Image: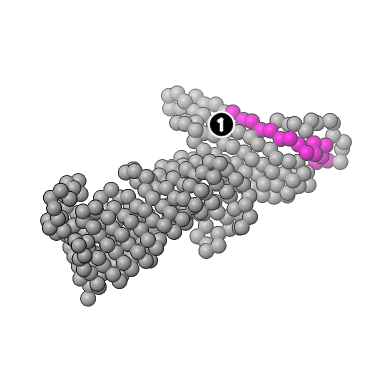
């Protein structure tokens, strides 16, 4: 039968030296459920089907420790952390229930609409952000997703934005594009679009565009297109609105192609001379 330790934090703080008390910790009880519990030098230790609950944070693991002086929770083995609608699955994690600081390795989790895995995850300050290192992101829930994004570092700010660096897009196991930096808003109009296909005048092609916010009222769109018979093309577009109720607006469009076969025509008619540098 499980033993419940209600208000564990308050009880241990009462036994601890006064200097270890932190007023900002509040009076929310820490609840630990486990069939095997003990205290070692003032640290609560639990083993086997461990459940730790503090406010809206729930932690499950095979082994857990709680230190009332530092507010640290160390959990090992089949760790699952549920907090503010987000899920982290890992084998080892250190979590501070007062500062919300999390350090974990070999992590899987969800940040809607993405699913991710990472070698390590840690929190960024007190704003609720996270940094994932050597991370993989996808919107596919398949065990073998059709595509995924691999990034060296990823900073995640829930309900705001995701910032990635050193990013490679994979289709299956094939790397398709590399980006030094990507910014993905979780609120504003922003997206990747990829259009593959084949044309008699283009050959095999992949058309891609990335839309992102530049500033308030200003959005940008980077285009990168690959056509096997024509070459690589790049472009940049921007839309902006300003003034009262955004009634003033403007658009900017640019596109450049170093055409490898500028003489190719859709018809059988001969084509006039066209320069390879086209814009």
Direction from residue 28 to residue 211 in the image, left or right: right
Where residue 58 sits: x, y (%)? Answer: 30, 59
Direction from residue 118 to residue 264 in the image, left or right: right
Where residue 271 sits: x, y (%)? Answer: 85, 34
Q: How many numbered discs sit on the rendered protein?
A: 1
Direction from residue 8 to residue 270 in the image, left or right: right
Between 150 and 223, the residue placed more toward the observer is 150
Q: Residue at x 47, y 43 (%)?
A: 163
The part of the chain drawn in magenta is: 252-267
259 to 59, vertically: above or below: above
Look at the image and tell me whether residue 190 can be seen: no
Residue bearing mark 1: 238
Asked if residue 264 is among those painted magenta in the image, a careful observer would answer yes
Asked if residue 217 is among those painted magenta in the image, a careful observer would answer no
Between 152 and 222, the residue placed more toward the observer is 152
Direction from residue 226 to residue 44 in the image, left or right: left
Query: Considering the numbered disc 1 on the image, is that residue within a helix, a strand or a loop?
Result: strand
Q: Quadrant of the N terminus?
A: bottom left
Q: Residue at x 12, y 58 (%)?
A: 15
């Amino acid at each position: 039968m499980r033993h419940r330790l209600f208000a564990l934090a308050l009880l241990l703080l009462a036994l601890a030296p006064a200097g270890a008390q932190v007023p900002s910790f509040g009076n929310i009880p820490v609840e630990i459920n486990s069939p095997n519990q003990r205290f070692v030098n003032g640290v609560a230790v639990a083993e086997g089907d461990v459940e730790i609950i503090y406010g809206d944070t729930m932690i499950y693991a095979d082994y857990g420790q709680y230190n009332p002086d530092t507010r640290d929770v160390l959990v090992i083995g089949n760790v699952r952390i549920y907090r503010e609608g987000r899920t982290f699955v890992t084998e080892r994690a250190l979590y501070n229930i007062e500062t919300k600081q999390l350090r974990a390795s070999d992590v899987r989790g969800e940040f809607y609409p993405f699913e991710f895995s990472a070698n390590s995850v840690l929190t960024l300050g007190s704003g609720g952000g996270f940094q994932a290192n050597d991370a993989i992101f996808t919107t596919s829930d398949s065990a073998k997703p059709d595509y995924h994004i691999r990034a060296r570092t990823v900073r995640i700010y829930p309900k705001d934005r995701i910032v990635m660096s050193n990013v490679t897009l994979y289709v299956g196991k094939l790397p398709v594009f590399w980006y030094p930096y990507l910014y993905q808003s979780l609120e504003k109009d922003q997206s990747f679009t990829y259009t593959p296909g084949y044309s008699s005048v283009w050959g095999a092609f992949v058309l891609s565009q990335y839309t992102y916010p530049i500033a308030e009222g200003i959005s940008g769109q980077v285009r990168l297109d690959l056509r096997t018979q024509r070459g690589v093309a790049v472009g940049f577009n921007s839309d902006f609105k300003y003034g009262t109720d955004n009634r003033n607006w403007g658009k900017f469009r640019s596109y450049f192609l170093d055409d490898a076969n500028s003489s190719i025509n859709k018809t059988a008619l001969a084509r006039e001379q066209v320069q390879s540098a086209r814009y």
